[in-house]
Image: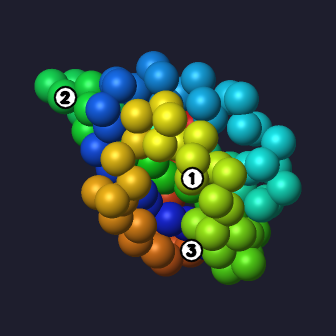
């Protein structure tokens, strides 16, 4: 399942990116992968992430992991601004290749 996450940051994208790399093991445990993550060109504190999870359980484990939520917040993620939208599996990836 694909998920789009939008979120505001308080410390810029680099801080959030460092946190993601430090928590790679958690994403792997949730069977999740980041397809794309980046900030708006005009606003380093506004971010978009496209993720893929093998199943809904992995997504829910990510969403409910209090330790990871705390790490995200410490990295500047304003979690009260998070909007998570489930997307269809009908997608175009890396086209044309």
Q: Residues within 10 Å of mark 3 (few under 14, many from 20)?
A: few
In front: 26, or 79? Answer: 79
Q: CA distance from mark 3 to mark 1?
A: 26 Å
Q: Which secondary structure lies at badge 2? A: strand
Residue at 60 percent of width and 30 percent of height: 19
Q: Quadrant of residue 42?
A: top left
Q: Residue at position x 78%, y 49% from top? A: 26
Q: Is residue 38 visible?
A: no
Q: Secondary structure at mark 1?
A: helix
**Screen quadrant of the N terminus:** bottom right
Left or right placement of residue 43 versus residue 10 in this view: left
Whichever of callouts 2 and 3 sits on the residue coming sooner in the sequence is: 2
Q: Which mark is residue 89?
A: 3
Residue at horizontal 71 percent and vertical 69 percent from the top? 61
Q: Position of residue 10 (x, y in %)?
A: 30, 32
Name the foreground residue: 83 vs 92.
83
Q: Nearer the viewer, residue 14 or 74?
A: 74
Q: State which mark lies toward you, 2 or 3.
A: 2
Which is more foreground, mark 3 or mark 1? 1
Query: Which residue is denoted by mark 1 in the rendering?
Result: 69
Instruction: Relative to 25, say whether 29 is above or below.
Output: below
Q: Residue at x 32, y 37 (%)?
A: 9
Residue 49 position in % (x across, y down): 45, 48
Residue 5 in view, yes or no? yes
Q: Residues within 10 Å of mark 2 (few under 14, many from 20)?
A: few
Q: Which residue is mark 2?
A: 43
- Considering every residue shown, the one lying at the far left of the view is 42
Q: Of marks 1 and 2, which one's residue comes earlier in the chain? A: 2
């Amino acid at each position: 399942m694909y998920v789009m996450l939008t979120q505001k940051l308080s410390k810029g994208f680099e801080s959030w990116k460092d946190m993601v790399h430090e928590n790679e093991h958690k994403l792997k445990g949730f069977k999740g992968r980041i397809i794309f993550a980046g900030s708006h060109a005009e606003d380093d504190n506004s971010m978009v992430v496209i993720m893929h999870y093998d199943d809904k359980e992995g997504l829910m484990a990510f969403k409910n992991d209090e330790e990871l939520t705390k790490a995200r917040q410490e990295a500047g993620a304003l979690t009260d601004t998070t909007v998570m939208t489930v997307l269809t599996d009908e997608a175009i990836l890396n086209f044309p290749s």
